[in-house]
Amino acid sequence: MDYIPPKSAIECYSESLYSDVQIRKMKKTKNIALSCMAGLDGWCSREKATILMDLLFLKRPKKVVEIGVWGGKSLLPMAMALNENKRGVIYGIDPWKNDASAYMLEGEHLDWWTQVDHERIYEGFISTIQLYHLGDVVEVIRASSKDAKIIEEIDFLHIDGNHSEASSLSDVKKWVPHVKKGGLIILDDLDYGEELEGGATTKKAAEWLDSNCTRFLQFKAEKNEWAVWVKS
Ligand SMILES: C[S@@+](CC[C@H](N)C(=O)[O-])C[C@H]1O[C@@H](n2cnc3c(N)ncnc32)[C@H](O)[C@@H]1O
């Protein structure tokens, strides 16, 4: 089957950057990632996964960190890109625990995260890593962002954990200082809880990033707004 880019996805590669063989291999890897994603629990869209993979093909990072993994819908496409690059490891930090997920949330978000079966999602994630032979590129850290040991010299950081104001702000403050100069930082769900009185709960984290890094890409889909910053 031919690779068809999802609508609105950026294709970063060009013939001046990559050979025909490389482009064919990257497209094949994307196809596999997109079909894997179809069976996973989570929120990452096909468009976002495609862009994340393109950025990883382009940057060829050594250390990628994701805060908030859930079923691996964003992590596994990134792991496949690293596998294709034959370079790099992705650390997935997530406690897979109801109380961590529900911490400081309100309304329907609180109800949902309090009840959902985290153990089932974790087990599904681990078996998908095995199914796609990604054990060498994925390091699972079952801990909260706050408790996880610092990882130094991060090249690429994807923050998609608990979206409360306190947690998202503490995620950027804890992890961004360990991103290398020129490294990329992605904050997901910039519009999370924007229906609430105080507005989006991730707003302060995004403002902190704007003050400390340079925002250079912004994406807005029907249900998700996210952006990419470069560490200065
Ligand atoms: C929005 S989901 C992640 C979605 C996933 N990245 C995707 O694209 O499908 C949020 C995740 O954050 C995790 N989480 C909650 N509190 C956390 C914390 N303090 N540190 C790290 N992860 C946390 C939850 O267990 C859940 O898996």
Image (cartoon, rainbow, N blue to C red):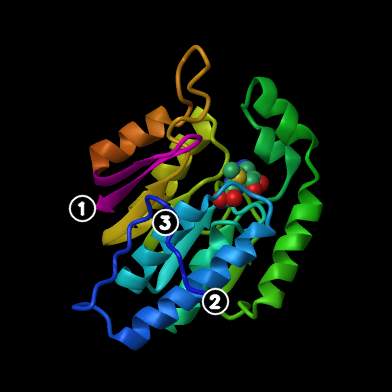
Spot occupied by residue 28 in the image (x, y as percentages of width and height): 49, 77
Q: Is residue 190 above or below residue 137?
A: above
Spot occupied by residue 8 in the image (x, y as percentages of width and height): 37, 50
**Disc on res. 137:** 2
Query: In the image shown, does 54 or 112 lie closer to the viewer?
Result: 54
Relative horizontal placement of residue 17, taking residue 57 as reference (left or right) = left
Q: Nearer the viewer, mark 1 or mark 2?
A: 2
Label 3 close to label 1 by CB (< 8 Å): no
Residue most extreme to the front: 1
Tell me the kind of residue under disc 2: Val
Q: Which residue is identified by label 3? A: 157
- Which class describes the residues within 10 Å of circle 3: few (<14), some (14-19), or many (20+)? many
Tell me the kind of residue under disc 3: Leu
Residue at image x 31%, y 40%?
209
Q: Secondary structure at mark 1?
A: loop
Residue at image x 27%, y 37%?
210
Q: Which residue is identified by label 1? A: 232
Mark 1 or mark 2: which comes first in sequence? Answer: 2
Residue at image x 38%, y 68%?
56
Mark 3 or mark 2: which comes first in sequence? Answer: 2
Tell me the kind of residue under disc 1: Ser
Relative horizontal placement of residue 73, taking residue 180 as reference (left or right) = right
Task: Give me the C-alpha separation between circle 1 and circle 2.
Answer: 27 Å
Q: Is residue 225 above or below residue 200?
A: below
Q: Is mark 2 within 8 Å of ligand 1?
A: no
Location of the N terminus (image quadrant): bottom right
Residue 152 within the segment the image draws in magenta: no
